[in-house]
Amino acid sequence: MGLNEAQLRGSLDALALSEPAFAAALARVGYPAPRIRDRGYATLLRTIVGQQVSVAAADSVWRKLEAAVGDPTKPDNIAAASDETLRACGFSRQKSSYAKSLAEEVTSGRLDLENLPEDDEEAIAALVRVKGIGRWSAEIYLLFAEGREDVWPAGDLAVQIEVGRILGHDARPSEKLTRDLAEAWRPHRGAAAIFAWHHYGAGADAAPV
């Protein structure tokens, strides 16, 4: 499970002590709510279903999937479904390939979601071997579903924007700079990312004063 409220607050308090700009931002917008997902196959399949579509569209695809194949959270059901069946549920050809890849990785035992490597980079490498799971999706899974405290999705656009705003940069920092800036925030970078999204959601109210 993801970082709980106590973990988030503890990490953000630690960041605020070491980074005055974080302390000021925290005073402006307050603490974020936890972002928690279930560990396992179902969360990754929902990630694939939700790629590049609205929440409502993803929910519609999921309901059609339940009607067509039974319980989608059982990878055997997806592995056994034909491409035509998945397409009829609203999958693109590409997403159908991704869903099949995920199901096959899990059913074969090549991907054991209950025992991913403890090292974050090794866990990311294991996840991105699945078609359709890129680094960002892997990082979000590890942060929200496993509660890995130091995962840092530096490639996320909102994270880049808000790191720049919080630290008072004139322009959005690059992915590399966003990654470099956060080195000083170890081992609390996961909470920093969740706070960045919270800060982004606050919009104009989060402008430095």
Image (cartoon, helix red, strand yellow):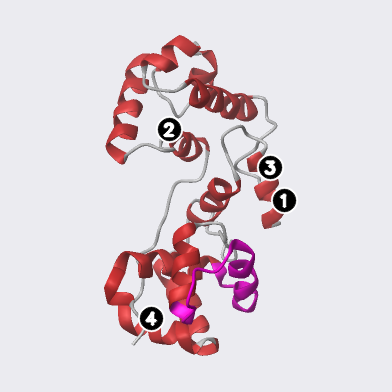
The residue carrying mark 2 is 49
Q: What stretch is highlighted in magenta?
A: 166-189
Q: Are marks 4 and 2 in contact (CB under 8 Å)?
A: no
In the rendered image, which quarter is residue 100 located in?
top right
SS assignment at label 1:
helix
Which of discs 3 and 4 lies nearer the camera? The answer is 4
Which numbered disc flags the more N-terminal residue, 3 or 4? 4
Distance between mark 3 and mark 4 Cα atoms: 34 Å
Relative side of 111 to 51, left or right:
right
Q: Which mark is residue 26?
A: 4
Q: Which mark is residue 126?
A: 3
Distance between mark 4 and mark 2 Cα atoms: 34 Å
**Residue 72 location, x and y as percent?**
43, 25
Which of discs 2 and 1 lies nearer the camera? The answer is 2
Q: Residue at coordinates 40% horizontally, 68% vertically from top-left? A: 5
Amino acid tagged 1: Glu
Kindly give the residue lying farthest to the front in the view shown.
Answer: 170
**Residue 76 location, x and y as percent?**
53, 20
The residue carrying mark 1 is 122
